[in-house]
Amino acid sequence: MKADAIKVKTKNGASAKEADASMSAKVKSEVIAWFWVILAFMLINGTLGQARVIPSGSMENTLLIGDHLIMSRVGYDAGIPFTNIHTPLWRDPKRQQIVIFKPPFDPAQPDYVKRVIGLPGETVDVRDGGVWINGKRLVENYTIGRSEPPGRSQLIAPFTGLPFTIPKDCYFVMGDNRENSLDSRYWGCVPRNDILGTPVLIYMSLDAPRDAWNGDIGARFLAYGNAIIHPGTIRWRRLLHVF
């Protein structure tokens, strides 16, 4: 009888140890799986693409307030997610391409979205309601309003105004809404190192108050909740627009 009791006790003890080992293996497997998920997310977010939302009307009607974009960083920039550490890659933007960049006059501000107008080595001027590159008027069919130069008092130092010869590794950018855009006319060119990527897709577009896209987290969640209740606030025709 005593021998049988000892055998049962030993068997139960072994079963408990096996259960603990099995649970430990499952936890370890789960931790490893999540580690690879997070690592993959950081790799994609840092080197392939990121999400952006348009907070202002400076690119109307190409981009509207509340447009949600996927930005491609492929070939343009690579960085460590959730930090300001990044490095430019091999691709350079082309004229009239839309780019996303850190504003050089204040890198602490949210990223800007503008269109490349002038390339390194070119001389840009804004007059007669249009943009001139090396003395030739640029043909633009995407703008709203007249292209006008700012007054001297509106310039952000050290920029001294137009005409402006773009230095090496720098790009002159402007918003499509020419009468409502703080762009290179006011502060000069964007260094190549500050360009992060280019938009490739609109994955969502919501007609909501501007506060929702200017850092007010509560207003943003309210906008998303309102879209669920009132789908008419979604600009359906803009979804999946590819640039």
Image (tube, helix red, strand yellow):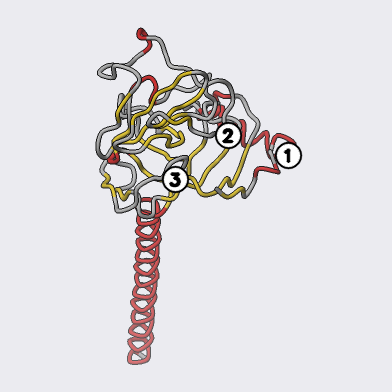
Marks 2 and 1: CB-CB under 8 Å?
no
* Count of all numbered marks drawn on residues in the image: 3
Residue 147 position within the rendered picture, expressed as x and y whole percent measured from the top left:
50, 21
> Which is more N-terminal, label 1 or label 3?
3
Gap in Å between the C-alphas at discs 3 and 2?
17 Å
**Which amino acid lies under the numbered mark 3 shown in the image of this protein?**
Thr
The answer to whether residue 32 is left or right of residue 141 is left
Q: Element at badge 3?
A: strand
Measure the C-alpha gap from mark 3 to mark 1.
28 Å
Which marked residue is nearer to the observer: mark 3 or mark 2? 2
Say which label, 2 or 1, has the lower sequence index. Answer: 2
Residue position marked by numbered label 2 in the rendering: 142
The amino acid pointed to by label 2 is: Tyr
Instruction: Provide residue 81's location: percent of width, then percent of height.
Output: 33, 47
* Towards the viewer: 57 or 116: 116
Indicate whether 123 appears above or below 81: above
Q: Earlier in the sequence, mark 3 or mark 2?
A: 2
Q: Give the residue pinned by disc 3.
A: 198
Q: Position of residue 185 (x, y in %)?
A: 39, 22
In x, y percent, where is residue 104? 30, 29
Q: Nearer the viewer, mark 3 or mark 1?
A: 3
Quarter holding the N terminus? bottom left
> Which residue is found at the position 59% from the left and 26% from the top?
144
* Between 212 and 204, the one nearer to me in the picture: 204
Q: Residue furthest top?
A: 153
Label 3 crowding class (10 Å Cα cut-off): few <14, some 14-19, many 20+?
Answer: many
Label 1 sits on a secondary structure element that is helix
The residue beneath circle 1 is 231
Q: Secondary structure at mark 2?
A: loop
Tell me which corner region of the image, top left, top right, bottom left or bottom right, holds residue 64: top right
Query: Which label sits on residue 2?
Result: none
